[in-house]
Amino acid sequence: MEFTLLWQVLTAVLLTWIGLRIWSDGVPQGGFDRLIGAGVLGLLVGRLAAMALQGINPITNPADLIIIRGGVHTGAATIAFIAMLSWSTRATPQALDGISPAILLGLAGWHAGCLWRGACLGMPSDLPWAWTLEGSQITRHPVEIYAAAGLLAAAWLVSRLGRRLWLRAGTALAAAAAIRLLTEPLRPSITGGPTLWYWAGVVVGLVAAVTGWVLHRPKVTVPT
């Protein structure tokens, strides 16, 4: 049995757990469980969407559900994840802002987990830090390491933002989508990747962040 994908998932889960403890301010009770639940639902919905687009009937082919390597639809998975997380924290909307840095750190762990699978490399490159695949002479961009580094920086930056409703959550969404958008051209792809979904994430995230910044500014009392 091949366990490298499992190690990648566990890397993401571990860094998410660490992030919740590093940036614990504003994290709701049971925050880790809520994230795992939302992540599982997002994975399931994303896999079902990918199967539907590939013409695979999940009812007649239920075993294909667990073949994650067969593809997960990024947009559907993200929408389901955000929807589930929003619903589970509906009593405390600020919780989304509290757990946003940990989510970015977990995503950084997912991308860095490419080291377990030997799947970090993208398009050919002559840069000094470019790597080669085993048995190849062609050096390539370590694109997943680029993404991991960007998400790690984003997690730290988001954790430094003020505590205004939607500001951290919106910035985190925009940052994650922007990092994927910027690194996508370095990934070998026939279709160019789901760039429209990434653009949508950037726009929605920025709108949420700006809305939070404008609507939830501290009130200034003018002396009379």
Image (spheres, rainbow, N blue to C red):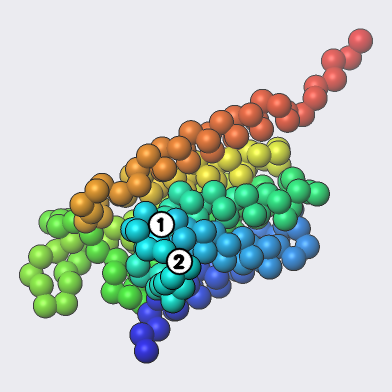
**Picture quarter with the C terminus:** top right
Instruction: Provide residue 121's location: percent of width, then percent of height.
Output: 24, 64
Q: CA distance from mark 2 to mark 1?
A: 8 Å
Q: Position of residue 50 (x, y in %)?
A: 40, 58
Quadrant for residue 61, please give it.
bottom left
Residue 214, horizontal then vertical, whole percent: 66, 25
First of labels 2, 1 by sequence position: 1
The residue wearing badge 1 is: 52
**The residue tagged with tag 1: helix, strand or loop?**
helix
Instruction: Answer above or below: position of 3 versus 122.
Output: below
The picture quadrant where one finds residue 210 is top right
- According to the picture, the residue beneath numbered tag 2 turns out to be 58
Q: Is disc 2 placed on a helix, strand or loop?
A: loop
Q: Is residue 128 left or right of residue 167?
A: left
The residue positioned 62% from the left and 43% from the top of the image is 168
Circle count: 2
Let me know if residue 83 appears in the view: yes
Q: In the rendered structure, which amino acid carries the disc numbered 1? A: Ala
The type of residue carrying mark 2 is Pro
